[in-house]
Amino acid sequence: MLKDFDAVAIIAVSDTDRARAFYTDVLGLDAPEDGPGGTMAFKTGGVMLLLYPSEFAGTNKANAVVFGVEGIDDIVADLQAKGAEFATYPEMGMTMDGPIHVDGEVRLVWVKDPDGNLIHLNQGMA
């Protein structure tokens, strides 16, 4: 029924100005299209990432969005230089390379946005 329709990833934020700065200046996304009610729509590859103001921002402890990337080491170095905060999960039993979780060719990292929403970057996963 829904297989032929596009999907949009959505993330709740508490402060739209702070979120705009993080998603453009730290994550490097192009300036968003502003929408009604303080929403912002970022184009990321083939997916729309919609941020919206909400009192419930940061309450989700699961991944908010996942990016499949190449060059994760360079991306992480850039994020670290910009002061990004990372979440780590040693209980996963993976080898740690700084904030990067490693299992063979698979490299995973979780970045927190200003509200604590988890932005997951992965390299080497199909």
Image (cartoon, rainbow, N blue to C red):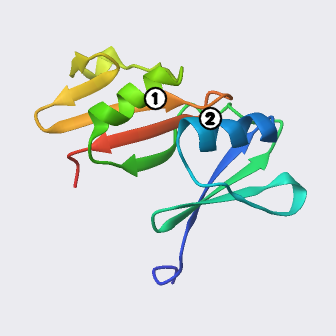
CA–CA distance in space, label 1 to label 2: 22 Å
Q: State whether residue 74 is above or below residue 94.
A: below
Structural crowding at the residue carrying mark 1, measured as other residues with C-alpha within 10 Å and reported as few (<14), some (14–19) or many (≥20): some
Along the line of sight, which residue is nearer the eye, 119 or 90?
Answer: 119
Taking the image as shown, residue 95 lies to the left or right of residue 84, namely: left
Along the line of sight, which residue is nearer the eye, 60 or 95?
Answer: 95
Q: State whether residue 82 is above or below residue 52.
A: above
Taking the image as shown, residue 83 lies to the left or right of residue 126, namely: right
Structural crowding at the residue carrying mark 2, measured as other residues with C-alpha within 10 Å and reported as few (<14), some (14–19) or many (≥20): some
Please tell me which residue is depicted at 74% across the width and 39% down the height of the picture.
13
Please tell me which residue is depicted at 20% across the width and 28% down the height of the picture.
102
Secondary element at image label 1: helix
**Residue 52: % across, % down:** 76, 50
For badge 2, the amino acid type reads Asn
Earlier-in-chain disc, 1 versus 2: 2
**Residue 84: % across, % down:** 52, 24
* Residue under pointer 2: 60
Rendering quarter of residue 113: top right
The tag on residue 79 is 1
Number of numbered tags placed on the structure image: 2
